[in-house]
Amino acid sequence: MENTSSKTKVYNVIIMDRSGSMWDIQKSAIQGYNEVLGGIKADAKTYSETQEHFMTLVLFDSTSVDNMYWNEDPAKIPVLTSETYVPGAATPLYDAMGRTLTRMEKELHDDCNHSVIVTIITDGLENSSTEYTLSAVKTLIKHLKEEGWSFAYMGTDHDVEGVTMSLSITNVVKFEKTEAETRAVFEKERRARSRYSKKIFDYATAHPEAGYEDMKVFHSKIASEYYDEDKK
């Protein structure tokens, strides 16, 4: 199957914990997310001739899993504020991930020229999902990684290594629950997304006739080195 679209569609997906324990870093989480959003907007503008960016933000706690923005133009998305990001309740991590990934996969099924970057941000262990299990989410992630999707996990205040290993996620950043480290880890995420867009641009420029399978292999490669700042 050949790549017939002139632009690569880049789907920026952020699944962000809104449980009560996030109160401790509410301000820095809001500031950090807004920096990431600003970076996505900048990348969309920089690479507008070869890429079309979309933004999805899912906020979750045990009262609801909310699609704040779903595959929308980043330029039209407002920043988070203390009124739109209000932590509370428990942590249905598996439900938030499962619902988001299942819907995204279904909607992108017939779109061959796309790249998906999923980042999960949480400060606690799963404790309240009712629809998805660890096994179901892991199976989904492994399948989507084979399709070239990128998965990253930013975690604090829990067994980050154990959780990410159980989910089959290898792009991992663990940080201390302080304002300074929260801002730093979001800045790392902003840089990672910017490098990712640059790599897509460079590959498309060097391989204008690349087909679907070629693109999938390439996306899998850059997905595996998402947080590696030495891999330009």
Image (cartoon, helix red, strand yellow):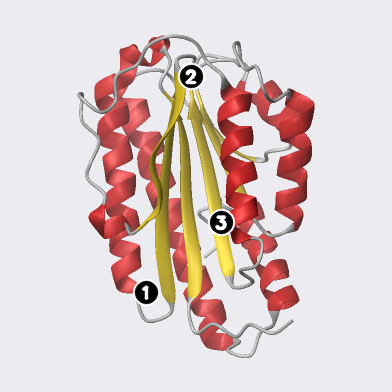
Using the image, determine if residue 22 lies above or below residue 200: above
Q: CA distance from mark 2 to mark 1?
A: 33 Å
Q: Which mark is first along the chain, 3 or 2?
A: 3
Crowdedness near tag 3: few (<14), some (14–19) or many (≥20) residues, C-alpha within 10 Å = many
Residue 81 position in % (x across, y down): 20, 30
Q: Which residue is mark 2?
A: 123
- Could you tell me which secondary element the residue under label 2 belongs to? loop
Judged by depth in the image, the label closer to the viewer, 2 or 3, is 3
Marks 2 and 1, the one that precedes in the sequence? 1
Numbered circle sitting on residue 116: 3
Point out the tag, 1 or 3, that comes first from the N-terminus: 1
Q: Position of residue 11 (x, y in %)?
A: 49, 57
State whether residue 212 appears in this view.
yes
Where on the picture, by quarter, is residue 94?
top right
Q: Nearer the viewer, residue 26 or 160?
A: 26
Dot 1: element: loop
* Amino acid, disc 3: Val
Q: Position of residue 219 (x, y in %)?
A: 64, 64
* 64, above or below 211, in the image: above
Q: Could you give the CA–CA distance between mark 1 and mark 3, rounded to whole angstroms?
A: 16 Å
Q: According to the image, label 1 marks what residue?
A: 47
